[in-house]
Amino acid sequence: MSLKQKKIEEYIERGRKYVKPGFEEEWDKMVNIRVKDIYEGMEVANALAIIESYKEKENPEEIKDLFLKENHSGISAQLVINIINFYIVDGNHIADIIKGC
């Protein structure tokens, strides 16, 4: 199994815990596309780190730090925010925290 395929499977599994009901298939498709693009899933990995941190600690400062430490370009920053906002339960709240950076 290739490294990309391993990433796809890992990200799908990690994200499925937090994905809005009814969005599971869309999540799987998005992860598959994002891991195969130019960023190789970096924005999915960052979104997952932020989501997992929020779900464990609900610490806004840590969420902001996780987002900012990646030094996103405008495009990758928006991808991370969109992934969280669109697919994740409580995603709009998490996205609002990030937008406050």
Image (spheres, rainbow, N blue to C red):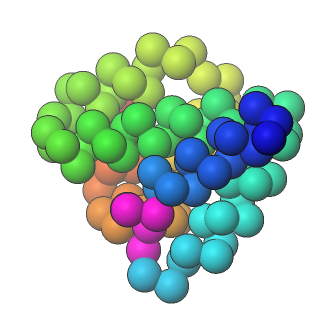
Picture residue at 32% right of the left edge, 43% below the top:
52
Judged from this view, the residue extending furthest toward the bottom is 22
Picture residue at 80% right of the left edge, 41% below the top:
1
Picture residue at 30% right of the left edge, 63% below the top:
90
Answer left or right for 56 relative to 10. left
Answer left or right for 17 relative to 9. left
Question: Against 1, is 67 above or below?
Answer: above
Residue 75 screen position, x and y as percent: 71, 35
Residue 9 screen position, x and y as percent: 63, 51
The foreground one among 89 and 2 is: 2
| Occupied quadrant, residue 3 | top right
Answer left or right for 4 relative to 87. right
Please tell me whether residue 73 belongs to the stretch shown in magenta: no
Q: Which stretch appears magenta?
A: 16-20
The foreground one among 36 and 73 is: 36
The foreground one among 99 and 21 is: 21
